[in-house]
C-alpha cells in the first residue's frame, strides 16, 4: 500500500468515525471506545502531514 493510499483510507475512516461519534452520547461506552480509535487516527494523520483543521469535527 502506498503512502497516499494509506492517507486516503485513514481520512475516510476518520471522517466516518466522527459521524458515528457525533451520533451517540459522549458518556456512552461506545463513544469511549470510538474515541480511542479517533486519537489513533489523529496521530497517524498528523504524522503523515495531514492538516486536521478542516477535517476534525470533534475537536477534542
Image: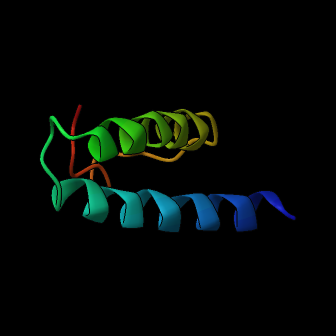
Q: In this orientation, which residue lies closer to the viewer: 22 or 41?
A: 22
Q: Is residue 1 above or below residue 52?
A: below
Residue 19 image offset from top left, x and y in percent: 27, 64
Left or right: residue 31 compared with residue 25: right
**Residue at image point 58% right, 58% down:** 10
Residue 25 image offset from top left, x and y in percent: 12, 47
Residue that extends furthest to the right in the rendered view of this protein: 1
Residue 58 image offset from top left, x and y in percent: 21, 45
**Residue at image point 61% right, 34% down:** 47
Residue that extends furthest to the front in the rendered view of this protein: 29
**Residue at image point 41% right, 39% down:** 33
Left or right: residue 33 compared with residue 21: right
Residue 38 image offset from top left, x and y in percent: 42, 42
Left or right: residue 54 compared with residue 42: left
**Residue at image point 29% right, 62% down:** 20
Res. 7 image quadrant: bottom right
Q: How is the image coloured?
A: rainbow
Q: In this orientation, which residue lies closer to the viewer: 53 or 30?
A: 30
Q: How many marks?
A: 0
Amino acid at each position: 500500500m502506498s503512502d497516499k493510499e494509506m492517507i486516503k483510507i485513514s481520512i475516510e475512516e476518520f471522517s466516518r468515525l466522527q459521524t458515528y461519534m457525533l451520533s451517540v452520547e459522549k458518556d456512552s461506552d461506545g463513544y469511549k471506545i470510538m474515541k480511542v480509535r479517533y486519537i489513533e487516527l489523529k496521530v497517524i494523520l498528523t504524522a503523515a502531514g495531514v492538516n486536521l483543521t478542516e477535517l476534525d469535527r470533534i475537536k477534542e
